Amino acid sequence: MELRNRIFMSPMGSNLAEPDGFCGDRLAQYYAARAKGGAAMVIMGSVGVAYPRGSGNQMQVAISDDKYIPGLAKVAEAVHAHGCKIAVQLQHAGAIAVNEPLRGMPLLVPSTPTQKDFDWPVDLTPQENKDMFEVFFQPGVKIEYQEASEDDIEWLIDAFAEAAVRAKAAGIDGVEIHAGHGYILSAFLSPSSNKRTDRWGGTLENRARLLVEIVRRIRTAVGPDYPVWFRIDGVEHLKNDGITIDDAIAATKLGVAAGADAVHVTMYADASKGISFTEAHTVQQPGKYVPYAAAIKANVDVPVITVGRVEPELADAYIAQGKFDFLAMARKLLADDELPNKLMAGRPDLIRPCIYCYTCISQIFLGSHTRCAVNARTGFEQTTGIEPAASRKKVMVIGGGPAGMEVARVATLRGHDVQVFEASDRLGGTAFFSSIVYPENGKLIDYLQAQLHELEIPTHLQTRVTPELVRGMKPDAIVVATGARRASVKVPGYDLAHVLSGDELREMVTGKLGASVKRKLNLRWRLMINTGKRIGLLNNNRVINKLSERFLPLGEHVLIYGGGLVGVEVAEFLAERHRKVTLIEPGPAFGKELMIVRRWRIMDSLRKLGVRMLKECELIEIKPGKASYRTGNGQIQTIRADTVIMALGAEPSGSELTEHMKAICSEVHCVGDADELGYIEGAVRNGHRVARAI
């Protein structure tokens, strides 16, 4: 197979299939977008060889019958039209299949698994618990296991081989056998899940036998020249008895000897732990798989593919060092399908970054299809095309946060004449402050600013929009993108000097000291902050983040009232800076605005950092050095609080200004948090939609 570069679209479950496993236009356009964007190959993730049996997602693509060949061929044609290759990842989910229980059928496994308590449901909201688990309590639904017999194993081997034949018939360029991530082949490979004593269990050679036989059967079925490879876990993390790198090396050597042309190295972890999803197959740590890929490559003479948050410039170095041969990208190509083309054009500054918020994978847990917080088109390619405007309009955007900048970008691409007006001295809005707490958000601001510069969109900083300014500009359309405001939560004592609202905390950290913050800070801190602002230190979110490790005018014991997205992120930020943090949330769940996979990670972090978390509690009074709250059962408790941060009270800010603008201009839109709280994803998606409507 000849490839145009070394970037693959990594296989991911998307839930974009049509009912009953068929491929349709939306799936074809989803993959075609990444092909057009310059990837060398896209790999369709988790394609069911025995669908509906063994399907890992309810809306999974199927390849279990000849009736699926025409749809697969349509996707292949759409990808090939852009000079890109396409492979399908052949999968049977085994113990983590979703359709068998719903149909009253047992789950196929190597050995009946040991039941474990899952730690992650506790961090779901009541609605998420309902969405994820209610279906499993319906009449007729049962979770039972069937230890694979010799006949079952023969059926499974045939299912993989027949699926490969169908892929070849559909014009697919190759197949990847999924032998990782806890699915059935991974379960046979792992001593943690394979307790058999027959020829399919025990020694590594026996545990790898199923993979080897599938490779052989596929090779016989498709011939010697059709590309066949497998994906394997380099290690099983957070398990004492899982796959080791030595196991992975030995299994890979056996698979290659059986006829595999390459190997794709990934990682898995104990799925009973919420942290596992960001410790393993959607890894948070950059480059975590690279050592495992390098160890495997040192032992085989076929190409090695790896994945897992590797930056392109580092990938070039790793490939030159012989650590692996091809880089598969998943989240990065959801965030920017044109990433390969931008790299080849020498414009990495124009790449829309993944901010690792886990919006994409979290949808799969909730039974929805994949989408992206920073790319409004991902998963909606059919309906979100940026088309030329019917007539060129003069557009005034009021507010330079993510929503305003996205409106400006898309409206300009459509041919409109756009200008952005921002009241402060920097772009980014509240996202600039959030990028201090969570630095990945800063990369999105950098990207949007680069887009405004590239498109030569006039941007007016420190400019408040007045009726006179609007009348002078005479815009055809106005977009209000002023973000959210934070109303005071008027608990008794809220106006004490050691109590900070969300806006006051932001002013303090970014050096924009309003009257109330000046009153609450002593002279020493005011001088330090003003000096930092004057010499430019507080204009850079990364510098502020670093400085805050040593300089932060907050007490040792910090109480944060409000356990939503802002509250939990600030709690983690302060606990990492050695504050003793108590987080009080009036509702039943923490971090409900965070996508669940990221929430599992941050909640794990808060627990490890020793943050005290109290839900369904109400703050009732603040006094110097302490605060009182009412528990869910009505008890009054008092705790030490040297500093109190109010992380509640955010509300849209744009309605009044929108109405005023309607008196001057016939077309006025309100977007982002100015219209409805939606944070970064809401800002980008809403901004993109409004820009397409102007």
Image (tube, rainbow, N blue to C red):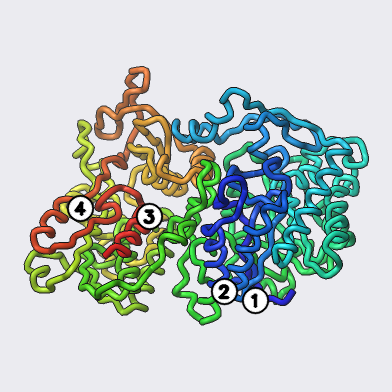
Amino acid beneath label 4? Gly
Q: Does residue 550 appear left or right of residue 181 in this picture?
A: left
Amino acid beneath label 3? Ile
Q: Which residue is mark 4?
A: 654
Q: CA distance from mark 3 to mark 1?
A: 32 Å
Which residue of the protein is positioned furthest toward the bottom in this rendering? 345
Q: CA distance from mark 4 to mark 1?
A: 47 Å
Q: Does residue 71 appear left or right of residue 36 in this picture?
A: right
Which comes sooner in the sequence, label 3 or label 1?
1
As displayed, is residue 67 above or below residue 531? above
Front tag of 3 and 1: 1
Front tag of 1 and 2: 2
Q: Residue at x 75, y 65 (%)?
A: 294
Which of the two residues, 403 or 268, is positioned nearer the viewer here? Answer: 403
Q: Which residue is mark 3?
A: 680
Check the picture and name the quadrant holding the C terminus.
bottom left
Which comes sooner in the sequence, label 2 or label 3?
2
Which of the two residues, 548 or 7, is positioned nearer the viewer here? Answer: 7
Q: Which residue is mark 2?
A: 38
Which comes sooner in the sequence, label 3 or label 4?
4
Q: Which residue is mark 1?
A: 5
Where disc 3 sits, the SS reads helix
Q: Does residue 473 appear left or right of residue 606 in this picture?
A: left
Where disc 4 sits, the SS reads loop
